Amino acid sequence: MQVKERDSDKRCNKRIDLSFTITLLGQDGETKNISASSVYFEVITDDIEAFTPGTVIPIQITATTSTPGFEERNIKLKGEGCIVRNNIEDVSSHGNRIGVALEFKDKLTILPDLIK
């Protein structure tokens, strides 16, 4: 499903709703939507400062591929991104669930030795 956002005229690429595991800053989150140039994800953290807009962080996204006639495989994509915005979605005793918009600095790299 494609997502149309209020400021979609500023977007370079279309976004699609996909849920993948995203690993960053030593913890895992979940993507909500992704495009060729950016990703929006949620993560539970006590360190909101680590997700301040303008911060560049390393990321790794794990995606599962499914091709008819072949078994499913996990692919790991690695790169860096700059945080564009964040917002607190929920506060609980487990930490703050925040939504983060991140723009990729360059194309993501496929980690071939981690394809399983």
Image (tube, rainbow, N blue to C red):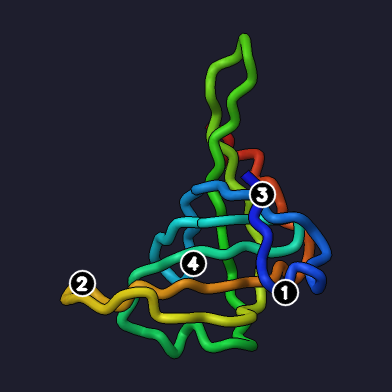
- Amino acid carrying mark 3 in the image: Gln
Residue at image location 40% in from the left, 60% down from the top: 28
Q: Earlier in the sequence, mark 3 or mark 4?
A: 3
Using the image, tell me which numbered label, if any, was put on residue 2. Answer: 3
Q: Residues within 10 Å of mark 1 (few under 14, many from 20)?
A: few
Q: Residues within 10 Å of mark 4 (few under 14, many from 20)?
A: some
Q: Residue furthest left?
A: 93
Between disc 3 and disc 2, the foreground one is 3
The residue singled out by tag 4 in the image is 24
Q: Earlier in the sequence, mark 4 or mark 2?
A: 4
- Amino acid carrying mark 2 in the image: His
Element carrying mark 3 = strand
Q: Check whether the beta carbons of the residues at disc 3 and disc 2 lie within 8 A of each other.
A: no
Residue at image location 51% in from the left, 80% down from the top: 86
Q: Earlier in the sequence, mark 3 or mark 2?
A: 3
Between disc 3 and disc 4, the foreground one is 3
The residue singled out by tag 1 in the image is 7
Between disc 4 and disc 2, the foreground one is 2
Residue 18 point in image, percent of width and height: 56, 47
* Mark 4 to mark 2 CA distance (whole Å): 18 Å
Element carrying mark 4 = strand
Q: Earlier in the sequence, mark 3 or mark 1?
A: 3
- Amino acid carrying mark 1 in the image: Asp
- Amino acid carrying mark 4 in the image: Leu
Q: Residue furthest front?
A: 6
The residue singled out by tag 2 in the image is 94
Element carrying mark 2 = loop
* Mark 3 to mark 4 CA distance (whole Å): 25 Å
Q: Check whether the beta carbons of the residues at disc 1 and disc 2 lie within 8 A of each other.
A: no
* Mark 1 to mark 2 CA distance (whole Å): 32 Å
Residue 4 point in image, percent of width and height: 68, 60
Residue 2 point in image, percent of width and height: 66, 49
